[in-house]
Amino acid sequence: MKALFALLKDYWGVLRRPSMYYSLGFLTLGGFIAGIVFWGGFNTALEATNTETFCVSCHEMRDNVFVELKDTIHYTNRSGVRASCPDCHVPHEWTHKIARKMQASKEVWGKIFGTIDTRDKFLALRRELAEHEWARLKANDSRECRNCHNFEFMDFTRQGKRAASMHSTSLANGEATCIDCHKGIAHKLPDMSGVKGW
């Protein structure tokens, strides 16, 4: 223990001492350049993991939820506007995006330990996984939905009576959020037996 303490003390002394070989300006410039390289690498990796190609690169996503997405209006529609995995599951704002990426890092453990590596395992956990995502969207007031769907631009006259009523009252007043009514809009619903209101 004393040897470790002595080593740390010597190392701290080296860090506190001015450089004998390099000027402060050189060290500052080197640190600045290293920071740019680190930030560029970090941001590149962040954007590379924020693509549909990355999301469906593992068979768990490709063979389960991505197949379902292909049959929905979010994938193919008359206007040609398509939502990809990150559009619905990753916030656009940087701070929220980083928080979501950190939260999603648990999925790496799931991949390593084979939590949902077969269709049967996926189906067994489907409702739990869906409930986690619904709770996340409920907590952030369906932030990702609102990136594309905005009350200010909705034409309620072109909606059905029930939709127009809900959108112009409960949702617009903040009493409810998109996910309250639109569960299963992009993926099949899990077994909802025993859930109030279903």
Image (cartoon, helix red, strand yellow):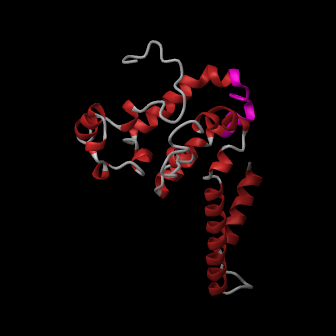
Q: Nearer the viewer, residue 29 or 54?
A: 54
Left or right: where 93 falls relative to 121: left
Q: Residue at 55% across / 44% down in the picture?
A: 76
Q: Nearer the viewer, residue 14 or 42?
A: 42
Extreme residue toward the top, this view? 194
Extreme residue toward the right, this view? 3
* Residue 2 % position (x, y): 74, 52
Q: Nearer the viewer, residue 164 or 114?
A: 164
Left or right: where 110 falls relative to 192: right
Q: Residue at 43% across / 38% down in the picture?
A: 137
* Residue 148 % position (x, y): 42, 51
Instruction: Inspect the magenta stretch and tell me whether residue 109 lies in it.
Output: yes
* Residue 114 % position (x, y): 73, 30
Left or right: where 123 falls relative to 163: right
Image quadrant assignment for residue 69: top right
Residue 175 visible in the current orientation: no
Question: Magenta segment, which residues?
Answer: 108-120
* Residue 178 % position (x, y): 37, 37
Image quadrant assignment for residue 121: top right
Q: Residue at 50% across / 52% down in the picture?
A: 81
Q: Residue at 26% across / 33% down in the picture?
A: 161
Instruction: Inspect the magenta stretch and tell me whether residue 116 lies in it.
Output: yes
Magenta region, main secondary structure: helix
In the image, residue 18 sits, relative to residue 3, either above or below, namely below
Residue 154 visible in the current orientation: yes
Image quarter in which the C terminus is found:
top left
